[in-house]
Image: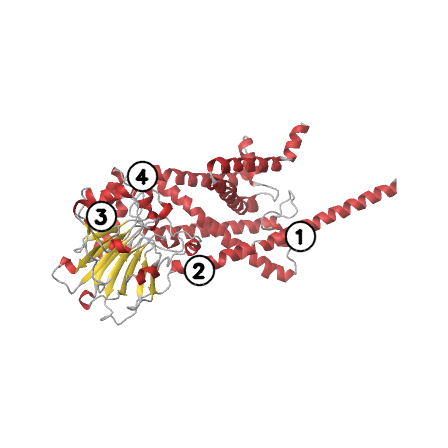
Amino acid sequence: MEAYSSILRWKNTIFYSMFSALGTVFFMYAGPFVAVFWFIILPGIYLLVRYMWLRLCRDPFLSPKSTMVGETWKVLSTCPPKVQKAAPTVTFFLFFGLCFFGGIFSAPLGHSSPEPPLFSTIFYNGFGSLVVLICAVWFVDGLWFFWLIFGEGMRRKNYDALATWWWRPAVVTAEVDTTQQKLAQYRAATIVLLYMLWTGLSVTAAYNPTILELDVPVPRLPAACDGYRLAMAADLHAGALAGVSDTENLVSYLNAMKPDAVALVGDIGDQVVNSALREKLEPLVNIEAPDGVYWSPGNHENLVSIEDYRTLFRKESPFAGKIIAIENEHVVLNRSNDTDNDSCSIVLAGMADYSGHGGRQHSPGQVAPDLDKALKNTPGPNGTSIETDPPSSQLPLIMMQHQPMDMKESVRSGVGLQLSGHTHGGQLWPQHAILYIAGYDGISGLHAFESKDGPSYLFVTEGVVGWGPRLRFLCKTDVTLINLRSPEVFEGAADTSITLATAAMFFAIIITPLSLIGTCVPIYFCLREKWRHRKYNIANSANNDSSRSHSV
């Protein structure tokens, strides 16, 4: 019994020692990536889950003394458990468990069927909605934080409430403050309502693409080409959560635009090329565009197997001839394929994806983007590439490049318009900020860059579907029609106004570090209260000892 008590007393030290030892072993034998996951990502996930459990379970329903591990152990070890105390924790982990299983099994289930199974659709999206839940908790906590400082704190000239709220009370007791618990229940209800509202809006934005139409003046575009209709789409990600119906919807959107040509700018597929993928992509052959439908690869085709995707579009029926793959190649578009109409010619270059650059290769056959090579090669019969003389530098040049990078270099090379995707507009806030850190030239919408021939433009679509859970929190999905305008004729200005996704990116850049700094405030008050309590106990103990010595 004494040995067991010693173990309980030293349980945290024993646990952290074993955790560190295992992490060291992983670092030595499995490499630094596994060690980073073990020491940083895994503890981070645990802290996030614990944080949400505190706000949704402990604060509104349990005593301040309750811990997540302790309550979970009680649920598992007590038969039958007390329903009133067990229900919050059971509901919490049941929801999390189903969402995590949805994330794990969505790929094997969705990659083998033409349409995503209902289980994957609900619970993989549920997995993504956990980010929305974290934001809802974060938002309500932020409001409560400001109230405790600038409302309650300034009114009472006392900030001790911060010490009993943020993580756990400074002085842990088993007693429940019914007033504080009632307030915590109101906060939890607000969190759930915000979560449901924001998740509903995110699902709506993900499954209902916005149809965009833009006028973009392209340097060197002749007046005879003014009004050329170029439709573009990217990031269909046919795979776990995108099936035949999503491709059919995309085709309907594109055909309704009545484009002259269509550009599919990467990440159209997001799984191995098998019979299910062929079925998912087959509706693409029904796109109607007199000047052709063109595909260039993205990082996900590279990640899976770029050679299989090249073969699919270049050699396999019904795709060969209907979808023209251009990877470090170019074509010259003549309106309605009128090769005799020399007055309207547009160079469309399709680039390899940046994921094939240098040591970042994921599968055999990847190549790095090369504009010089693209302007010397055109697609030939039976999937071949034919070397030709570069087109005239006086022709307008439009480039399909999946990732919105190196636009300044592209402008110096004569690119008048670059079409990109990849970013998904951030997809789930606040990861918008990561795109800024990654150094992309834009995450959404139209961006202008100065060139010797006047402004050149980068357009970044937020994508048709997206990767992973199919939610769009503070961004959208879109399919876009670009009306190419000749600077000789066009008198207006291109719409380079800031998009919701870009605004959300800057908001995330500002609010995330401020929030992290803000968490230090309640932690400070909590530590201060603990220190006061410790001093009080020490003083009390000294007084008791003094009283006993006098009585003796």
Q: What's the residue type where badge 3 is placed? A: Leu
Numbered mark located on residue 528 in the image: 1
Give the Cα distance between marks 2 and 3: 36 Å
Q: What's the residue type where badge 1 is placed? A: Arg
**Residue 82 visible somewhere in the drawing:** no
Q: Is residue 156 left or right of residue 472?
A: right
Q: Which residue is mark 2?
A: 506
Compared with 159, 545 (above or below) is above
Q: What's the residue type where badge 2 is placed? A: Phe
Of residues 176 and 507, the one drawn nearer to the viewer in this rendering: 507
**Residue 75 visible somewhere in the drawing:** yes
Of residues 328 and 101, the one drawn nearer to the viewer in this rendering: 328
Q: Position of residue 266 (x, y in %)?
A: 29, 50
Q: Earlier in the sequence, mark 4 or mark 3?
A: 4
Give the Cα distance between marks 3 and 1: 64 Å
Q: Secondary structure at mark 4?
A: loop
Q: Position of residue 157 (x, y in %)?
A: 65, 61
Give the Cα distance between marks 4 and 1: 54 Å
Q: Which residue is mark 3?
A: 284
Q: What's the residue type where badge 4 is placed? A: His
Q: Which residue is mark 4?
A: 111
- Identify the residue at image location x=55%, y=31%: 77
Total numbered labels placed on residues in the image:
4
Q: Earlier in the sequence, mark 2 or mark 3?
A: 3
Give the Cα distance between marks 4 and 2: 36 Å
Numbered mark located on residue 323 in the image: none
Q: Position of residue 37 (x, y in %)?
A: 48, 42
